[in-house]
Image: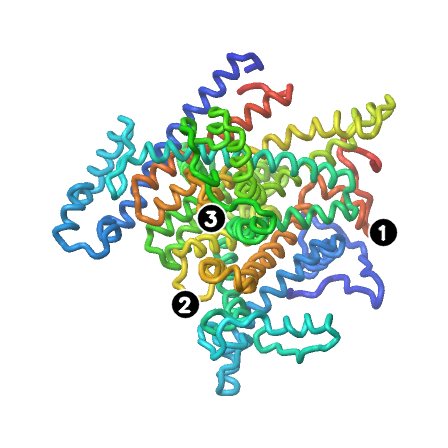
Amino acid sequence: MGRSLSDLGFFIGRRFLEMLPVLLGVIVLTFFFTHSAVPDPCGAWNPHAKAPVLAQCRKTFGFDQPLYIQFEKYIVQLVQGNWGTDQSGAQVFPLIAQGIPATLELVLASLAIMVIFGIALGVIAAQFSGRWPDHMIRVFYLSGWAAPTYLAAIILAVVIGPTFGLPTGGEYSVNPPFPQPTHMSVVDALLAGNLPFVGDALVHLILPATALAFLNLGIITRMTRTSMLEILPMDFVKGTRMKGLSESNVLYRHVLRNSLITTTTVLGFTASGLLSSTVVVEEIFRWPGIGKYSFDAIVNYNFSGTIGVVIVFAIAVVVANLIADVLYGILDPRVEWR
Amino acid sequence: MAGASPTPPAEGGRPRRTPRPRRAIRTGTWGEVVFEALRTLRSNPLTLAGFVLVVLLVGVAVLVVVVPPITSTLFGHAYSIVPYDPNGIGQTTLVGPTWWPWWTGLFHLKPAPLDLSHPLGTDELGRDIFSRVLAALPLDLGIGMFITLLSVAIGGGLGLIAGFWDQGRLGAALSTVILRVTDIFLAFPSLVLALALAATLGRTLTATLIALTATWWPYYVRIVRGEVLVIKHQGYISAARIAGEREGSIVVRHVLRNLLEPLTVYATLDIGSVIVTFSTIAFVGIAVPPNIPEWGSMIAYYEGLFYPSAVWLVFAPGLAIFVTVLGFSLLGDGLRDVLDPRTRRAFARETRSSTSPEPVPPLGAPVGEE
């Protein structure tokens, strides 16, 4: 119960242990939902197949066995690191693992856009609270919230992209001549030392990252504004003013710094929505990440893929919340690791 | 809206409140509640805009549903405020908004005749876009409200149980089970869960409704349990217990009553989110069959067909979703500002009526304007 590094270690370890039953619940729930709703996806996989082909398919994938035996088999495989196969017989895990870095890159880029613009707008709104810049910013961020992600993505891809000559699909304009060990487009290009491709990859990131950032920009703006307005009347702010510090110094060095603590915690809450939105955004912008994979898996009755993606998403949400909590604790010296 | 306000507004001027004896348990008549709400709305133009939008949309949606059966019983012929059959194939194919040439004619000082027959244009089969967007309004709005209410009922009920009856062996066990299951559901990103459920449960409207409800109820367990844990330890609950009130009566008269405020805010904000999620599932193509007009599926269909040459096809349903969700967001956001005790103090300073007593700031609260 303190602020030492070992306390932090215990805190993180405990949170991971707490995650395990939740994860097991997620797996059980997804497995039984999918398998009891569609007990036999063979017909959906091969709509025109004849009976013996379907019977063979059922036998191969084990759909002719009772549900609990299927589940037992699945869990045993999962523990051994085998996440099952999709209908074409391809292993699910390598496909998902390939998509994770690409999605991570996209999410980080959108996080950067979100934080930079969200905090800037929040500061302006707080500075002019109750006057027209504040109202304009409120309308702007509520519009971001009101526009569904797919609508924002389509408008960006079809109207904004061609107008400004920005690319609207994929990671690069042409297939890169270098290997892609990390599957993050910018990092791969950097590792290869191929500067034109670094620029190309960055330009390809702009539109999908903006589409993703659009939804949560408002939450960051709102939290920054609210917490700045809460801190502005505090005594220490008066103290800094009395010391004769300039108004910008007071606002940015003292008020904004303290209000960022709250903003950090909110970033954790946005993780779930951000990951959800990747499903639509990656599909529209043909980004080869886990969101596009999960879209395809869900639409094509790919059960192993669906469960695998859900596991990864659930872990990502928990980890994102943990990171936000740890950051909060580091930023706020009053917090103890409990 | 039933029940007259005890203080009818004075003619012409601002309504004046006469002081009346305080009761031990504060009870407000419906008139007072409506009056309070209107005063709240007047203080913020954006909230008022949201309120007007919501009332307008709900009114139009009700008219779309109600007018045909009523007119058919009254006049023997069903009239509708939807100008064309949303699925009726017209003679013309793919016309832009028909007032557009008139509008451009203004700049050429040679006004074209104003033609409002297809205000938002038609699609490739000659179906009127305005009628299709209008016909989809009751579906989207109704699903937004229905799912939100259902989630409030299910999640709120479970949250109340988990928060209020967590003592004793049975209560503790029950509340632990509820909270663990809620945690599991909350670990899914909402859209992924809703999509996966809707896709596997049969790709129909019913499946989508089940999927949306399954996605939304856990949030209300968290919200309601948190509120109940605070309310439970308030003095008036103990006072009611000591006064011999039954548990059920305490829950209804004190706990539920205090839950109403936060739940209204969250539900208002959530209606918009539910509409967005529903239309996203429809956009993917697994919520409604193509012959039922729905905003999300219209955007997907038209975007896939013609987008570059016919912008209005995607903009019309997109604008419909945008305006609807914006209305609920503005209203909910404004309500949250009013109901949040931290901002309520500042708000009370602005709109305090002259006869109400000075609010006493709590100890340590900031005094004075900044």
Q: Which residue is mark 3?
A: A284
- The residue that mark 1 highlights is B354
Q: Report the Cα–Cα distance between label 3 and label 2.
A: 24 Å
Residue placed at 32% from the left, 48% from the top? A300
Label 2 crowd bin: few (<14), some (14–19), many (20+), radius 10 Å: few
Decide if residue A111 is on the left or right side of residue A227: left
Q: Secondary structure at mark 2?
A: loop
> At numbered mark 1, what does the secondary structure look like: helix, strand or loop?
loop
Q: Are marks 3 and 1 on the same chain?
A: no
> Please, is residue B203 above or below residue B191 in the view?
below
Q: Residue furthest left?
A: A52
Query: In this rendering, which labeled residue sits more in front, label 3 or label 2?
Result: 3
B168 or B310, nearer to the observer:
B310
Single out the mark in the foreground, 3 or 1: 3
Task: Between residue A214 and residue B196, name the one nearer to us.
Answer: A214
Quarter of the view holding residue A230: top right
Answer whether labels 3 and 1 touch (C-beta < 8 Å).
no
Is A189 placed left or right of A76 in the picture? right
Q: Amino acid at mark 2?
A: Asn
Residue at the spot of label 2: B291
Q: Is residue B158 visible in this depiction of the protein?
A: no
Q: Chain of mark 3?
A: A
Would you place residue B227 above or below residue A335 in this image?
below
Amino acid type at mark 1:
Ser
Mark 3 secondary-structure assignment:
helix
